[in-house]
Image (cartoon, rainbow, N blue to C red):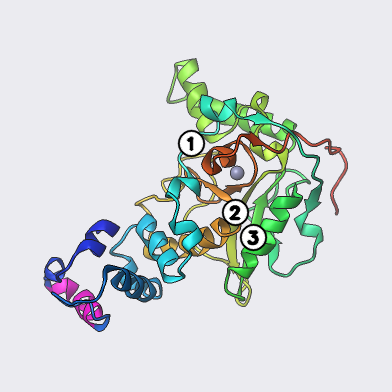
Amino acid sequence: MYSLHTLLLSTTLNQFDTAEDATVKDDLKTLGWLPGSQISHAIKLNRTAEFLIGRPKLADKISTRALLTLSFHAHQDECILSKPISAFVSPMKVADPKVLKVSIEDNGEPCIDLLSLNNPRIKHMQELDQRFKPSHNQSGFVRKSVHDALLKMLSHLPENIGIAIYEGLRPLTTQRKYFQKKLKEIRKSEPDETKARAKTSALVSPPDITPVHCTGAAIDLTLFSMREHFLLDLGKFGVIFGPNDHASTFSDEVSTIQKVNRVLLLRAALLSNLVNYGREWWHYSLKDRVWAIAKGEKRASYGIPSLDEKKPRRQ
Ligand SMILES: [Zn+2]
């Protein structure tokens, strides 16, 4: 797989000089990216980006991270290009001591049920695939700013693409169940209790650290086709139970179409001020502790809201 660096700093076509890369070579010629050509690096970058994004065959040659950067160049998203990628895709673990050090001051923002908006471009994943049944009745709730960010995301996505959500707000009781179930699973391969807890904590927040999903600041989501009414393929969804080689946002294990679809989701979300948790391609958050670190903010804005766990959202 070519890195962005290799691809963009190449001033000749020599590295594509094999029979199987003949089409790549032709395509780069089409771009005017010829050996010794006098066009500037910036123009090469823009032309290459515009060209690659629409061509899965070529996208296969580069990583998701490189494809994402190229997408920002193609759209001239200067607000993102001026910052490191860690300001948008967080490498931090949710239970990292640095993350836990960030103080939380709840700003009192209300929670809004995304599923009661009746927006045809926001659906629960279960409506598109029965396997994604929600595990409680508050999964559509998020803080107002997250709701606003999702509406903004829609403006950065093609009109025929919608957002399929799985879970926003998560009751603490559900969080406890998830953590215990995951810990049990991990103990099978990790008998050391401290290590098992640490491994579990990287994937599911321990209930006692103000888990981000319990604050309404996070949402697990993917994309769907409005016309064909199916979930787009971004790789395997979900990490809580069972292994998932596709979970990492920049996983090398994903197919070309999965990379291209991830870039579509990432760009729309990052332009809407959300931060992606780099260990889970589907998890985005706003104004929580991971977001605060990524954005260089001093504190997070949401604690645990007081919603009645027993009250059904809707039937
Ligand atoms: Zn999540």
Q: Quadrant of residue 131?
A: bottom right
Q: Secondary structure at mark 2?
A: loop
Foreground pick, 164 / 190: 164
Q: Are marks 1 and 2 in contact (CB under 8 Å)?
A: no
Q: Quadrant of ligand 1?
A: top right
Give the left or right position of residue 235, taking residue 157 as reference. left
Q: Residue furthest bottom?
A: 30
Q: Earlier in the sequence, mark 2 or mark 3?
A: 3
Of 25 and 201, the residue lying toward us: 25
Q: Residue at x 55, y 33 (%)?
A: 94
Q: Which residue is mark 2?
A: 273
- Where is residue 28? Give x, y as percent: 24, 77
**Of the residues under marks 1 and 2, which one precedes in the sequence?**
1
Residue density around tag 3, few if under 14, some if 14–19, many if 20 or more, within 10 Å = many
Instruction: Please tell me the numbered disc located at residue 164.
Output: 3
- Start-end of magenta stretch: 19-29
Q: Is residue 147 above or below residue 209?
A: below
* Residue 28 magenta: yes
Foreground disc of the pair 2, 3: 2
Q: Amino acid at mark 2?
A: Asn
The residue identified by callout 1 is: 92
**Structural crowding at the residue carrying mark 2, measured as other residues with C-alpha within 10 Å and reported as few (<14), some (14–19) or many (≥20):** many
